[in-house]
Image (cartoon, rainbow, N blue to C red):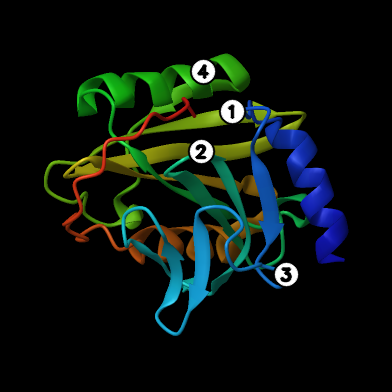
Amino acid sequence: MFAKALIGLSLLLAPLEAAESQTQTIEELRSGVGEVERSSAGLIHRSSGFVFPVTLGSSPARETTTYAPGDADVYYTLLGGGNGDAWLTLYLYPASGSLVEEAAGAATAIRERWQVKEVPAPVAMGPMPAGAREEWFEGSVAGLEVLTGYRLIRSGNWFIKARLTIPKSGGEQAKLRGQQALRAVPWAWQNVRRTALVTTPH
C-alpha cells in the first residue's frame, strides 16, 4: 500500500533533480552512499553534522535524496500522499545566497509547478522560529487539492527548509500529522562547521 502511494507521490511532485542525484529508502540506507548516514542519534548529514530525526511527529522518514555535495533531503509521511496523507520533505543544503533570495526562489518554484494562490499562514503550524521565512498556498497539483508551503531558516552556512503538503482529502488527521511534523523539525540547530559547498536549487 505505502509503496504504491510513494510511486503516486513521486509522479505528483515531479521534482527537478540534478543528473547525479541519488535516492535511497531509509530501510536500505547504505553507509558511505550519499550525504545521509544512519546513526544511534538519527540520520546524520555528513557534511554539516545536522541530524534528521527518524520521525517528525507521527510521520516516519521514508527516503533520502542527495542532490550534490552537502545537498540532501529526507522525506517523511505516515501513509503517503497518494493515500491522502500529509508529507514533508526536509532539506539541508549549503547557503549560497541570502535568506530573502532563497525564500523568493522557494515561493517561485511552488507557483511555477503548482496551481495555487497564496493564503495566510495557518496558526496551527506553530510559531515561526526567529529569523525564519515561510509562505503558504492553497490549490492543486494533478487534480489533488492541497494546502502547501515552505518554512526556511539559515544556520551559519546552511539552509534548513521544510516543504509541507497536506491533501484536503485527508481530512483532520492528515492536517494534524502535517502540523505535528512541521513543529518537530529541529529549527534550533546551530551550525558549527564552516563548509563552503556548491548547491543546486530546489
| Mark closer to the chain start, 3 or 2 | 3
Alpha-carbon span between mark 4 and mark 3 = 34 Å
The residue that appears at 25% across and 43% down in the rendered structure is 195
User: Identity of the amino acid at label 3?
Assistant: Glu
Q: Which residue is mark 4?
A: 111
Image disc number at residue 139: 1
User: Identity of the amino acid at label 4?
Assistant: Arg
| Mark closer to the chain start, 1 or 4 | 4
Q: Where is residue 80, by image quadrant?
A: bottom right
With respect to residue 126, does 177 lie above or below? below
Instruction: List the single residue furthest toward the front.
Output: 32
Find numbered disc 2 in the image and state the secondary structure of the residue it sits on.
strand
| Mark closer to the chain start, 2 or 1 | 1
User: Identity of the amino acid at label 2?
Assistant: Thr
With respect to residue 162, does 54 lie above or below? below
Q: Is residue 77 left or right of residue 38?
A: right
Q: Which residue is mark 3?
A: 28
Q: Nearer the viewer, mark 2 or mark 1?
A: 2
| Mark closer to the chain start, 4 or 2 | 4
| Local crowd size for mark 2, using a 10 Å CA cut-off: few (<14), some (14–19), many (≥20) | many
